[in-house]
């Protein structure tokens, strides 16, 4: 049975609203109701799989993504989601097989200029999952997702920023500081990294070094409220002679 696109959009919007409100049980009931009505609509199975993922019901999540793919083998979004969950379950071989199948399905004329397309998209899905867990204050789970994203695509600075944010949330300040000191060489113009590194030095009472990074952050982005705040704050600190 087919479904009108506007009906599908309305149901999806309702599910997204429930997610924003963290009402995952309500989203599940809505999706199951409509799956009973339209059992072969791939989008509903994919959304239910995402919902189960958010509830950390990974086995149920896998079943729904696989169901979606039964109705549409070329449903790339479901394949990417399935790869994410399989990795979380430690089923890396199966995840690799799904990735290879997805690569094989891609139109080479469209993606020949982007040979790493699948890896990049999968990394972005890990990043989104990390953001979800971070908002839930599930910092260890969030950190794992960001690390998986970096394994697939280490280029985006935002991945490294979030890794550091998670380390700090987990009270791993020294670990975060060491990570920042290494990664900032790769992204010298990323103001957020300088700001975070400055904060770790400030916690260590190394105000001269903290000031240096706050100044760099402000020079790169003087419009950001945080850079303005710490730049103003650091101006009031006395110069510490012979202190790093």
Image: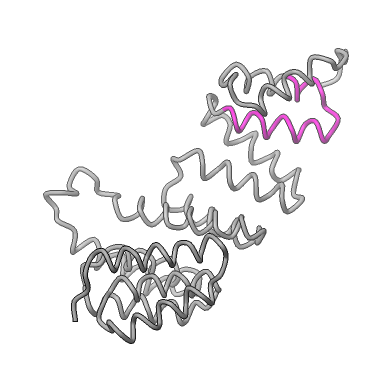
What secondary structure is the magenta-colored segment mainly?
helix
Give the percent coordinates (x, y) of residue 129. 50, 59
Quarter holding residue 62 = bottom left
Q: Which of the two residues, 194 or 16, is positioned nearer the viewer here?
A: 16
**As drawn, is 109 to the left or to the right of 191?**
left
Q: Examine the rendered structure and indicate whether residue 146 appears above or below residue 184.
A: below
Is 85 displayed left or right of 45 in the figure? right
Of residue 206 and residue 36, the one placed in the foreground of this image is: 36
Q: Is residue 178 magenta?
A: no
**Numbered range of the magenta stretch:** 191-211
Color theme of the render = one colour
- Please identify the residue farthest to the bottom as the structure is shown: 36
Query: 15 or 161: nearer the eye?
Result: 15
Q: Is residue 179 above or below residue 95?
A: above
Quarter of the picture holding the C terminus: top right
The N terminus sits in image quarter: bottom left
| Magenta run includes residue 196 | yes
**Location of residue 149 with respect to 208 vertically, above or below:** below
- Residue shown at 69%/43% (left/top)? 176
Relative image position of residue 119 (x, y in whole percent): 35, 54
């Amino acid at each position: 049975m087919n479904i009108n696109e506007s009906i599908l959009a309305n149901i999806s919007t309702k599910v997204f609203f429930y997610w924003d409100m963290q009402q995952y049980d309500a989203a599940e009931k809505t999706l199951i109701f409509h799956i009973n009505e339209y059992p072969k609509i791939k989008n509903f199975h994919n959304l239910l799989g995402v919902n189960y993922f958010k509830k950390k019901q990974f086995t149920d999540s896998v079943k729904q993504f696989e169901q979606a793919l039964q109705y549409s083998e070329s449903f790339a979004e479901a394949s990417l989601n399935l790869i994410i969950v399989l990795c979380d379950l430690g089923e890396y071989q199966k995840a690799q097989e799904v990735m290879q199948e997805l690569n094989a399905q891609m139109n080479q004329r469209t993606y020949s200029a982007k040979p790493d397309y699948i890896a990049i998209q999968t990394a972005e899905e890990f990043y989104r999952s990390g953001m979800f867990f971070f908002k839930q204050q599930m910092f260890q789970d969030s950190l794992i997702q960001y690390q998986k994203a970096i394994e697939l695509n280490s280029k985006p600075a935002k991945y490294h920023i979030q890794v550091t944010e998670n380390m700090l949330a987990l009270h791993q300040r020294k670990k975060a500081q060491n990570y920042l000191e290494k990664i900032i060489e790769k992204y010298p113009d990323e103001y957020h990294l300088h700001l975070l590194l400055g904060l770790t030095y400030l916690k260590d009472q190394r105000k001269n070094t903290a000031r240096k990074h706050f100044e760099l952050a402000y020079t790169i982005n003087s419009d950001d409220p945080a850079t303005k705040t710490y730049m103003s704050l650091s101006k009031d600190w006395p110069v510490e002679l012979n202190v790093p």
